[in-house]
């Protein structure tokens, strides 16, 4: 029998949902859209919710909406590339990233979405490995191995053990 939830339960989780959405999208307006889409889906499918943690269920919905949106954006970008010749230039890192806290956040942002999601769910939100596995729809062993790789990658990025940036040869 599904457990029902109230609007107050959702309001209490809004800051956590927004923080997770910001870590995934890296843009405030996109994060707000993602939170709205997540809540809309949760409210329309509240009768289909099974037993378990409401927070993990909402994170699962949000992550799946994010992945679906990324796939859609890649398809759209592929279509646009057929019609345009110009390539977007990558922005150089700003000088503010020299500050340790900003550098650590920048390193976190450089991780793949799967690794960021796991680190956020386990380290920031305090979900168990099983809850994280349920939220992302993957086996618990995959959660543990991805989390280990994510922590190692973040440690390497923070220690400066990254590869040199790609440089263009100018004639």
Image: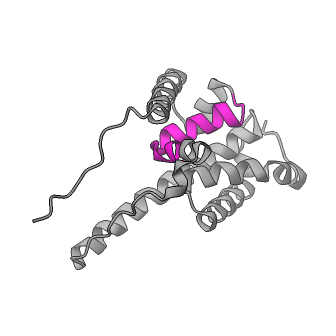
Most foreground residue, 3 or 55: 55
Query: At which x and y percent is residue 79?
Result: 29, 71
Q: Main secondary structure of the magenta part?
A: helix
Residue at position x 65%, y 44% in the image: 59
Residue at position x 49%, y 29% in the image: 155
Q: Is residue 14 left or right of residue 80?
A: right
Q: Against 82, is 10 above or below?
A: above
Query: At which x and y percent is residue 21?
Result: 63, 53
Most foreground residue, 83 or 153: 153
Q: Is residue 136 left or right of residue 44?
A: left
Q: Is residue 109 magenta?
A: yes
Q: Residue furthest left?
A: 171
Query: Which quadrant holds residue 54?
Result: top right
> How many numbered marks appear?
0
- State which region is magenta: 106-127
Q: Where the C terminus falls, by quadrant?
A: bottom left
Q: Is residue 136 magenta?
A: no
Q: Is residue 85 left or right of residue 107?
A: left
Query: Which quadrant holds residue 85?
Result: bottom left
Q: Where the N terminus falls, by quadrant?
A: top right
Q: Residue furthest bottom?
A: 83
Query: At which x and y percent is residue 120?
Result: 62, 38
Q: What colouring style does the render use? A: one colour
Most foreground residue, 9 or 24: 24
Residue at position x 55%, y 56% in the image: 96
């Amino acid at each position: 029998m599904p457990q029902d939830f109230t609007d107050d339960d959702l309001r209490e989780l809004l800051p956590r949902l927004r923080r997770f959405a910001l870590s995934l999208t890296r843009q405030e307006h996109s994060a707000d859209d993602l939170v709205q889409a997540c809540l809309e889906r949760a409210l329309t499918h509240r009768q289909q919710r099974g037993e378990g943690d409401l927070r993990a269920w909402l994170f699962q919905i949000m992550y799946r909406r994010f992945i679906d949106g990324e796939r859609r954006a890649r398809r759209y970008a592929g279509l646009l590339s057929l019609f345009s010749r110009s390539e977007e230039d990558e922005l150089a890192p700003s000088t503010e990233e020299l500050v340790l806290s900003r550098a650590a956040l920048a390193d976190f942002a450089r991780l793949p979405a799967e690794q960021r999601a796991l680190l956020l769910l386990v380290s920031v939100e305090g979900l168990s490995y099983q809850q994280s596995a349920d939220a992302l729809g993957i086996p618990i062993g995959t959660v543990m191995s991805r989390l280990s790789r994510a922590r190692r990658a973040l440690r390497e990025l923070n220690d400066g053990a990254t590869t040199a940036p790609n440089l263009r040869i100018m004639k």
